[in-house]
Image (spheres, grey):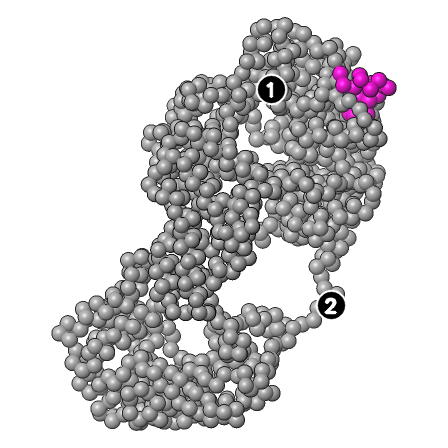
Amino acid sequence: MRAGGTNVHTIPAGAPFVDTLAAGILARVGDDPLELAAYTVLLPTPRACRSLREAFLRLSGGRPMLLPRLSPLGSVDADALALTSESLPSLHDALDLPEAVSPLKRQLLLAKAVLAAPDLAVTLPQAARLAADLGRFVDEVHTERLRFDGLHAVVPEDYAAHWQETLKFLRIITEHWPLILQQEAGGIDPAARRNTVLETLAALWAAAPPPGPVIAAGDTGSIPATADLLAVIAGLPNGTLVLPGIDQDSDDATWDAIRADEAHPQHALARLLDKLRLDRRAVRPWNCTAEPRPARSCLLAEAMRPAATTEGWRSLEALGPEALDGLTRIDAANPEEEAAVIALLMRQALETPERRAALVTLDRGLARRVAMALKRWNIIVDDSSGRPLADTAVGTYLRLAAQLVATRAHPLALLALTKHPLSAAGQDAHDFRATARALERTVLRGPRPAEGFDGLLTALKATQYFEFDGQQAFLIDWVERLRTLAAPFAAAMQGKAPLKDLVDAHVAFAEDLARSADESGAERLWRHDDGEEAARFIHDLRQAADGFSDVPGPEYPALFEALMAGREVRVRFGLHPRLAIFGPMEARLQHHDLMILGGLNEGTWPADPTADPWMSRPMRKAFGLPSPEFKIGLTAHDFVQACGAETVVLTRAERVDGTPTVPSRWLLRLETVLKAVNLDGRLDAQGELWLAWARQLDEPDRVQPVSPPEPRPPVAARPRKLSVTKVETWMRDPYAIYAQYVLRLNVLDPIAADPGAADRGQFIHQALDDFVRAYPGVLPPDPLNELLRMGRAAFGPLLETHPDVWAFWWPRFQRIAEWFITVERERRPTVRPLATEVKGQLELSGPGGPFLLTCKADRIDRDGRAQGLVLIDYKTGTPPSAREIELGFAPQLPLEVAIAEAGGFEGVPAGPVAEIAFWRLSGGNPAGEERPVKGDVATLASDARAGLEALIHAFDDERTPYRSCPRPSMAPRYTDYAHLARVQEWSAGGGGGGE
């Protein structure tokens, strides 16, 4: 190995990389402003190039200067190289490259190849997702300079059969993809093109070194083509290599272990130095820069010690407390608390002029939480990873537009789209959303109307419940306008259509729907950062879709989402200049005064190795692909570099989604080393203070327990008419009566609701009512079949459209029908039905005026033997208990007796009631059951009436409040107004009143 005289340098992790690099370049240039422009600086990423440009600006004090030529290593300009290679024809010809195939074009071409694969049944959206995975695999193979024909050697015959099938599937890229690239794509794979450009640049500079100085900085050479170029630059007479944070202090045994440990942060650098045949001690500090925090550097080096040498922890020399200066650990309870404390740390950093802070994390959920938490102070932070286009306002709008047409105007899809802020359809956007809400209340709550806009129009024409005169015609016109706008897109999605035509129809519908009263749809849709990125995506998709095969219309929305995945939106304006959120890759070479390393849990940072869909770990190794440990080593290097900042805070959440987490392996190693050097417990001393401050942000000054509500409306506002079933509610939960009849708050049915227990009871009641009405005397010859026929009519189309109704409800009804007919045959000789579903009422008096009691009796019979009426209530649920009836908390049937005795039922003469009973109709075992109410019927009716009159007198006094569940033991099983009454708040605190 070379031992000296090298032009390879390093910048320690504790020094700000780009500032130190810029200072060194300026020191070499001196006072000549033109000499700086002769430099070429190659950096790992475009963001690193921007950071170096900003560093030059900071160091120049704002005076104008000609900057060096800055270029990211991953995207060297091939056209510029071609101009400098004209003197070398062989290299010049090598740079005559086709353009890289666009990601969308490649994904669609690979998806078409996947669909054509034998013995593979997948939909087009599934094929598109498989194609994205295949594209990443192709790039990985090209990056490592491997050949696809080597795949045959990694799956010997003794491997499991599914690996043999995988190898057959991969023929898509081993055999078919090169031909597809040549014949249809008109380009080459991006990774292959990058390799060719880097290889050509290396050959060009090796044959004809550039006249000006060349500096390659900040790269670890993890990509083979990049490592070759770095080796060439290191050998140029005017070339310089500046490496990030090489460990020059560890002993030779440790360095040998680092070479063998792929998960070590120095492993990639050790491999690069071996390629350069350079001893690490020969690497010189750049610009004579020393490690500013040597104690912390030593601590981190020990924490990251290779596993093979960790026995050295037993003999560690003591470290002073200065090793922990500027280093803090915070263990939050959950991700929400972690985000709050990080946001507080970043906000506090702004109190110091020119102080900069950054969050570095692999946890995208945490990054989004922190960005939202900073909005508390009206701070918009630069998130380098951006936000998925599919989750932005415009991306969501485009997805919803496709789903609306694909689902044939399903109520949920319709409301999601029409309530979107971009929807207007030529109206004012606010008025448009108000109309959508009116349509929701009118026909979309409850069972779903028939499919399509025609089904909505039919439902609107059939309903009679509108909020004002003319609303029906207005809503019909509104729906017809939507149908007209969506018609071309809906027509394109019928059957199959070319992808490009579907995209054009999709965009046309989205623009038409986005048009407002004063702006065109294109103006509203394609502006702002998300609109511009969506426009670029649509442009790329239209180009990639040119010539693509026909797409089944129902599969288009899922295909659209699959193709949109991976597109990110980055905010460009209004960002705070001193705060940032980075992923570890974006954070490379960045140095802020405060670096917060968040989400440090095992499985998050470092991330769990993703399961390779194509190869097992031994197969990847045999083929030559990097191991998961190598990627962990690169991430570890990013971690150590970020830990070199002046102030570093390490954060994690102890639980995520309620599940305990394990601290990152690097935190556990740090804990172990701190115990070994007697510094245990000092790292997180400041953390508790920051957690306390973060918790105080949302803690009130004092907690005042809420009292149960006791509304006392004036008597004139209190209801003067209730049904017998609502009387029970009045007794058990007066607040529900107040909410429904005084505040007039009615519960909304779910949107496009599936039939529930109430619907089942309604259908059964309807069928029995129709049967008894049709045959009040003699039963028909085949009563069971006749009742089943009426049952089918009552259940209606649900038997065809809802399999669960046919599979579960209908068999139960069949058993109920058999039981019912058996009972009817036994009763008809002595009992004659008088009325079913009959309305009744009884007027009572109270201090506030007359009070009307109403009801609808399920069935009233006349018993010839007992010479009295029989009141029957059908119950598909659980009937009330005898004790509830006796105590008066289930007064329905006793109050119906009072109405019957007073002659209050239509068409039923007044008379004594001989029996009251519940018929429980469960359809189980037994299918039905007669449950006569015990006790003297007249007494029960008299007591129920007296209790109701007492209740009327009590609530005709303005001092009587409508309490929520005043008797907890008799509270209803369910109330729609518990949330409004805030029951969970005051009942949990032991509050609540009783009577």
- Quarter that holds the N terminus: top right
Q: Which residues are magenta?
A: 21-38
Front residue of 530/56: it is: 530
Q: Which residue is mark 1?
A: 224
Q: Is residue 813 magenta?
A: no
Q: Amino acid at mark 1?
A: Pro
Alpha carbon distance from label 1 to label 2: 62 Å
Does the image show residue 253?
A: no
> Which residue sits at x=55%, y=57%?
430
Query: Farthest right residue?
Result: 31
> Which residue sits at x=62%, y=23%?
75
Does the image show residue 415?
A: yes
Q: Amino acid at mark 2?
A: Arg
- Quarter that holds the C terminus: bottom right
Packing grade of label 1 (10 A; few <14, some 14-19, many >=20) is some
Residue 489 in picture, x, y percent from top left: 40, 44
Q: Closer to the N terminus: mark 1 or mark 2?
A: 1
Q: Quadrant of residue 216?
A: top right
**Tag of residue 878:** none
Q: Which residue is mark 2?
A: 702
Query: Farthest front residue?
Result: 518
Question: Is 952 left or right of 895, judged from the image as shown?
Answer: right
Main secondary structure type of the part rendered in magenta: helix
Secondary structure under the numbered disc 1 in the rendered image: helix
